[in-house]
Image (cartoon, rainbow, N blue to C red):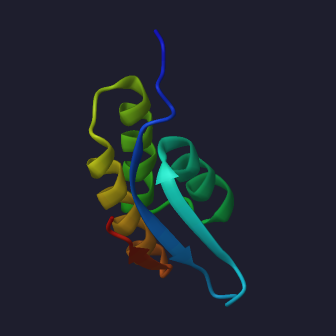
């Protein structure tokens, strides 16, 4: 099975408590990195759903827009500000 980690979606900028700390997410790899390394919690329902959708996107079983929406929901759940950027 070949995974496609290069699929892009409209960016989501994540702003954390530290005003100098932000993260822009626009790919499944970026989403996985943000979720696993940047999020303040890793046990919320929306967080776990975003991880699952991230894997589904690289496998070709979900659309990138679904992952984008999941990242926004996970950020809301974790108290992280998410700015949805549209192109």
Q: Horizontal and vertical percent for residue 75?
A: 44, 71
Q: Residue at x 48, y 74 (%)?
A: 78
The spot of residue 29 in percent (x, y) is: 56, 42
Residue in view at x 46 percent, y 46 percent = 51
Instruction: Give the total of numbered labels.
Output: 0
| Vertical comparison of 12 with 70: above or below | below
Does residue 70 appear to the left or right of 30 in the view shown? left
Q: Quadrant of the C terminus?
A: bottom left
Decide: is 23 above or below 31.
below
33 lies left or right of 80: right
Residue 51 lies, with reference to residue 6, above or below; the image says below
**Residue 40 visible somewhere in the drawing:** no
The image quarter in which residue 7 lies: top left
- Residue 71 in sight: yes
- Which residue lies at the image location 46% right of the left edge and 26% below the top edge? 4
Residue closer to the observer: 54 or 9: 9
Residue at position x 48%, y 43% in the image: 28
Residue sitting farthest toward the top: 1
Image vertical order of residue 51 relative to residue 68, above or below: above
Question: Which residue is at the front of the view, 82 or 11?
Answer: 11
Task: Quadrant for residue 83, please give it.
Answer: bottom left
- Where in the figure is residue 20, as x and y percent of width and height? 72, 86
Point out residue 70 in the picture as x, y percentages from the top left corner.
Answer: 34, 57
């Amino acid at each position: 099975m070949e995974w496609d980690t290069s699929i892009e979606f409209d960016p989501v900028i994540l702003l954390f408590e530290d005003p100098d700390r932000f993260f822009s997410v626009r790919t499944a790899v970026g989403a996985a990195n943000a979720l696993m390394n940047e999020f303040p919690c890793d046990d919320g329902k929306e967080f776990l759903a975003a991880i699952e959708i991230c894997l589904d996107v690289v496998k070709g079983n979900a659309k990138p827009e679904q992952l984008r929406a999941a990242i926004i929901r996970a950020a809301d759940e974790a108290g992280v500000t998410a700015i949805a950027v549209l192109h």
